[in-house]
Image (tube, rainbow, N blue to C red):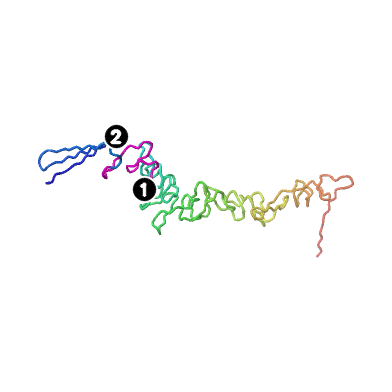
Amino acid sequence: MDNAFICVVILVKPYNLIIRVQARPTRGEYVTRTFIKPRIHPPVFRGIHFTPDCVHHLLSGGQCMKECPKQSFGDPSGWRCQLCHSSCQTCHGTGPTECELCLGGTPSLHGQCPQVNSCKANCPMGYYEDMDEGRCGQCHPTCGGCSGPLQDDCESCSTFSPMLFNGACYKDCPTGTYYEAFTCMGCHPHCYSCEGPGRDECQACAVPKYLQNGTCVSECPSGTYTSRQEASGRELGFCLPCDHVCSTCSGASPRDCVTCSTGYLRLLHLCVAHCPTGYWPYEYHISYSWKY
């Protein structure tokens, strides 16, 4: 049998190298020889890499560095560069929930990144199952969860655009919808805008409808007049109250009366409780007679 050799390398500060060679012949005890090489320059000696202590620097792969390389982070407890989790591009720890940026430079979601070249039963929040590619694809930024990459593929919304309607996420619910349980729900068909699903929960009506007590009507009732206002390119209709002296009117002023309320008399364009001097109360009736 050939001799078996065992080399033991010891580095002693300030970098005195001790090489101890042990040989065991075929028979007999170990034979030890020790060689001392003083003050070699770290960290390389004849192809052997050593691990020096780094002062105010980070240790990576046996070398002292000012900054850690990609996919690693500086561990201040040991002044060493530690590898990030394989799903991270940058990180602040070794775990899969301590990513800052994912591979490709996309931000992590709650510290997590989709696993590259790994199989998962379900994609994490913010990603969808791309069955054609066999991977997890990233949702649109407005989506919390989704079925595809487009803006209207959302199934839930992010905190920045929390209101879901027809697969898209909005900061505010669009016109014709109201907000309920993180979703924009459709108003009653008569309503232009609303606060709930009922036909009496309208907030505005589009002409030829007019808003009256939360309902959209075709004609304003007695004691009100029609008013139109433009908003966002649409003409909205409202039933507004007449002055209290008017039974019917064309506007809000007491001079806009068409007929007077009970207890008031018509005087030119006004409705008065008493006729002034020079006038007397006059009531006229129209009667019809029919002859056969």
Q: Position of residue 35 (x, y in %)?
A: 20, 38
Question: In the image, what residue type sits under mark 1?
Answer: Ser
Any mark on residue 232, and which? none
Going 14% across and 41% down the picture, which residue do you hit? 24
Going 36% across and 48% down the picture, which residue do you hit? 86
Q: Position of residue 168 (x, y in %)?
A: 52, 53
Q: Residue furthest bottom?
A: 292
**Label 1 vs label 2: CA separation?**
37 Å
Provide the residue span drawn in magenta.
45-71
Any mark on residue 86, and which? 1
In the figure, is residue 169 to the left or right of 80?
right
Q: Quadrant of residue 72?
A: top left
Going 66% across and 49% down the picture, which residue do you hit? 213
Q: Secondary structure at mark 1?
A: loop
In this view, the residue in front, 58 or 37, is: 37
In the figure, is residue 80 to the left or right of 190?
left
Q: Residue furthest top?
A: 13
User: For the residues carrying marks 1 and 2, which lies nearer the camera in this image?
Assistant: 2
Q: Looking at the image, tell me whether mark 1 or mark 2 is earlier in sequence order.
A: 2
Give yes or no for contact between labels 1 and 2 (Cβ–Cβ under 8 Å): no
Question: In the image, what residue type sits under mark 2?
Answer: Pro
Any mark on residue 14, and which? 2
Magenta highlight on residue 251: no
In this view, the residue in front, 264 or 67, is: 67
Q: Position of residue 112 (x, y in %)?
A: 41, 46
In this view, the residue in front, 131 or 279, is: 131
Q: Secondary structure at mark 2?
A: loop
Query: What secondary structure do most residues of the magenta stretch adopt?
Result: loop
Q: Residue furthest right?
A: 278
Q: Quadrant of residue 63?
A: top left
In this view, the residue in front, 79 or 48, is: 48
